Amino acid sequence: GAVVSQHPSWVICKSGTSVKIECRSLDFQATTMFWYRQFPKQSLMLMATSNEGSKATYEQGVEKDKFLINHASLTLSTLTVTSAHPEDSSFYICSASRYLYEQYFGPGTRLTVT
Amino acid sequence: KQEVTQIPAALSVPEGENLVLNCSFTDSAIYNLQWFRQDPGKGLTSLLLIQSSQREQTSGRLNASLDKSSGRSTLYIAASQPGDSATYLCAVYKNRDDKIIFGKGTRLHILP
């Protein structure tokens, strides 16, 4: 149990376009989902926290207009990278909170912006 | 501000050896602590979750300990195997707001 999926697993897009990444909790309802970003050989950095039905809370330094987060249901959160640029290329990982203080992580999405 | 440090940053050991990975955190007011494994280009695999009231957890050849008062956790891997090669991440759950702070990880390479 407690499986989190992400789609797509990898995506290549052209500079200036937008790309959407989905995060789903497959067998549980998650009131809170988290989005992380990971650069090569670096650790995960929390980008934002999203709660179902409310606006996401962004960490300091994360552009909310560039990284749009929608948490429409208890099993789905989406991250849209708008007007992507090469510096947005990264590994994006989501997690879902099944219980307080216990997160389950998705397999990640590799974004490459050309 | 909570900071999580993992030492060493990288480690290479011959197959069969027992080894210890270290994690320290600056603020002892944590809730849970979790160890993850990450293979290159992949997501996170949860290894062990230690709740704040616990002092250790064991799973197979892995044993993780937690000493909140000193701000330390260790991950012990017994009889290491080449398949154990990966990056190991330590993460602490901040008290009250359910956010995780990750360490930078230890890149482990087991030599066959």
Image: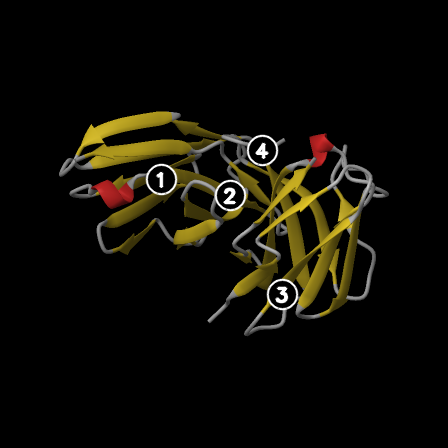
Q: Between residues A43 and B85, which one lies in front from this camera angle?
A: B85
Q: Is disc 1 surrounded by few (<14), some (14 to 19) or many (20+) residues within 10 Å?
A: some
Labelled disc at residue A39: 4
Q: Are marks 3 and 2 in contact (CB under 8 Å)?
A: no
Earlier residue among tags 4 and 3 = 3
Q: Is residue A92 above or below residue A88?
A: below
Q: Are marks 2 and 1 on the same chain?
A: yes
Near mark 4 (Cα within 10 A), the count class, few <14, some 14-19 or many ≥20, is few
| Quarter occupied by residue A95 | bottom right
Name the secondary structure under disc 3: strand
- Label 2 SS: strand
Please name the amino acid that badge 3 sits on. Arg
| Label 2 close to label 1 by CB (< 8 Å) | no
Q: Earlier in the sequence, mark 2 or mark 1?
A: 1
Please indicate whether residue A60 sits to the left or right of residue B34 in the image.
right
Residue at the right extreme of this rendering: A65
Q: CA distance from mark 4 to mark 1?
A: 16 Å
Residue A80 placed where, x, y %? 77, 51
Q: Which x, y percent locates residue B48?
A: 37, 52
- Residue B89 shown left or right of residue A72 in the figure: left
Give the labeled residue for mark 3: A24
Q: Nearer the viewer, mark 2 or mark 1?
A: 1
Give me the disc on residue A57.
Answer: none
- As measured in the structure, the alpha-carbon distance from the residue carrying label 4 to the one carrying label 3 is 23 Å
For the point 71% across and 30% down, the residue is: A87
Q: Where residue B45 sits: x, y (%)?
A: 42, 52
Answer whether labels 2 and 4 touch (C-beta < 8 Å).
no
